[in-house]
Image (cartoon, helix red, strand yellow):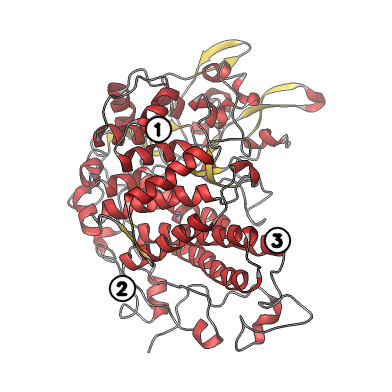
Amino acid sequence: MKKIIYLVAIVILFPVLSGCEDFLDTKSFTTKDSQSFPLTEEDANQMVTGVYNSLTRTTNSVSSSYFFISELACDDRFGGGGYNDKFSQAIGHLMRTDLNNLNGCWTSHYTGIARANAALTALEENLKEGTVRDQKIGEVKVLRAFFYFELVQLLGDIPLMKAAPENVAEAKTSPPQVSQEEIFKFIATDLWEAYTSMPVERYTVRPSGTVTKWAAAGLLARVYLFYTGFYQKETLPYEGGQITGTQVAEALKNCIDNSGHSLVPDFRSLWAYTNTASKKDYPYAKNLPDWVSDGNNPEHVFVKKMVPHASWQSNPQCNEYSLFFAIRNGAGKTDYQTLFPMGQGWGMGPVNTNLWTEWETDEPDDLRRKGSIWNYQEETYYKDGVETKVDYSRQWGADMMVEETGLWQKKVVAIRAYGKGAGGADLWNSFTSSTDYFNLPGDDFQHGHGTDLIYIRYADILLMHSEITKTVDGINAVRNRAKLSPIGAYSLEALQKERRYELAFEGVRWGDIRRWHIAEEALEKKYGVPVYIEEKLTVMKYQSSGGAAKRYRDTNGFFMIPQTQIDLAGGSEYLKQNAGWGTSEDAFVAWNDN
């Protein structure tokens, strides 16, 4: 007999439903229920907002989120953090600190899936045929596919909830754990149906952050490339048959021709260090084009909207990755100006020195390298109108960083700007974080990060189109924006390098090295690199027996299903653990310098 699984228990969207046996099919004449809501576009927007809110849940479980894990697990970054931040270091070595590291990821994603299932039932039953119905159902299907895509990449074989339960008994029954192929078939069906039914509109028609036909096309391409690459298949299965590369390429071409999305003229204006409040004191950015801010950026195809929030208890909506990835305690200094424009944070995700050096070897004139990586040896700031070299002393005090290289990414990170003191006087040590972009007072380094999180941008659309069609047009468009010479003929090696450099630190590298089957080789190159462990200079060393390549082979790049979920499901008979997990061999206790 199947046991109850803690996916989400029962998700109740409407108050009247909680006492009903057929709780998605009961009519009420006094309150909103599945037969009276949603009926209008306003109703539909309210319904779909609840599904979008689950994106907040997935990003607020930062330490177990796909974006965070994929960044620290890949070859271009280390776990880092303070000596006590063992969970981030464990991820970087494909290890764990306890049996439930990904429980937040599990619950947040299945909450989103359950909300999407309930929303689709109500939308399909109540909204009239037409553009509004097609758009709203498409949005929900794309979001559901996104939740499943992140889960299946992290955890492999997972339970599949295809629809909202029809009664209480069904809601209490665990859906089956199914094969990855079945999960991908479900994802592809959602995305193909969304893409083919959503209206053809310029992206500016919808508010920033709204899922569009073009987001569906971009996510479909990412799913197609991962599935066909990782599993070495020719096509992507869906309920109607097979989706081919030609079909996916046509969807991307439709986006290129008809969406209105485009590359911003200067790559560096994609990132918040070129905001007008910070750049005046940052020599590198002073003469660059202004930051193309959130909501006005034609390159944003699929983003999670972020705003500052007041506290950890206030349903956080801020970009907490900016906090996790910023330099820990400003390297122990109270005079944070010496690291300008980098803000204070928790020190996770130091950049692997290999990326800096290999990038310089491959593309010595690539403006994206310094536009993406903060190198303390080359950075300066203005003090009293004079350009001054940063002081990056490693006398850190109690909270000392580990796996630290002096290289930090500049894309998803805390950025500071100078503020005003009493009476409007300039104070060099008075800062705001990204709150400055919203003209909010004070320096809230934990909660003030309001820049949107980008899942898919237009440069990725171009590069995926080049990869699928084996043509150079997309690659060369991206290279032209970076002021680099075009390549004459397509090659996978050229495509791989372009993706590594253009999309560095944007959550795609881990999936790329897995689907290209170069993960073992790439991960081995993380080791032997000079790093600081607290105050000691050493080299990056294996923390698992047998090394990185063996650890990847043992797990195939999948992480541990939370043991709590296996127990609640009734044991491994109902929910099987992934290979390579659950023994002392994969447990990270403390950084071992031997």
Q: Tell me which amino acid carries mark 1.
A: Glu
Which of discs 3 and 2 lies nearer the camera? The answer is 3
Residue 502 numbered mark, or none = 1
Percent position (x, y) of residue 162? 46, 72
Q: What residue does disc 3 label?
A: 41
Q: Quick one: which residue is furthest to the right in this view?
A: 423
Toward the viewer: 417 or 181? 181
Quick one: quadrant of the N terminus? Answer: bottom left
User: Can the viewer see residue 237?
Assistant: yes
Looking at the rendered structure, the kind of residue marked 2 is: Lys
> Which is more N-terminal, label 2 or label 3?
3
How busy is the neighbourhood of tag 1: few (under 14 within 10 Å), some, or many (20 plus)? many
Quadrant into which the C terminus falls: top left
In the structure shown, which secondary structural element does the residue marked by tag 3 occupy? helix
In the rendered image, the vertical position of residue 343 relative to residue 16, given as above or below: above
**261 over 568 or under it: above or below:** above
Q: What whole-number distance in Å separates the C-alpha atoms at marks 3 and 2?
A: 42 Å
- State the residue position of label 2: 576
CB atoms of marks 3 and 2 within 8 Å = no
Question: Looking at the image, is mark 3 or mark 1 nearer the viewer?
Answer: 3
CA gap between label 1 and label 2 equals 38 Å
Q: Nearer the viewer, residue 447 or 146?
A: 146
Q: Position of residue 404 (x, y in %)?
A: 38, 35
Q: Earlier in the sequence, mark 1 or mark 2?
A: 1
Identity of the residue drawn at 50% across and 74% down: 163
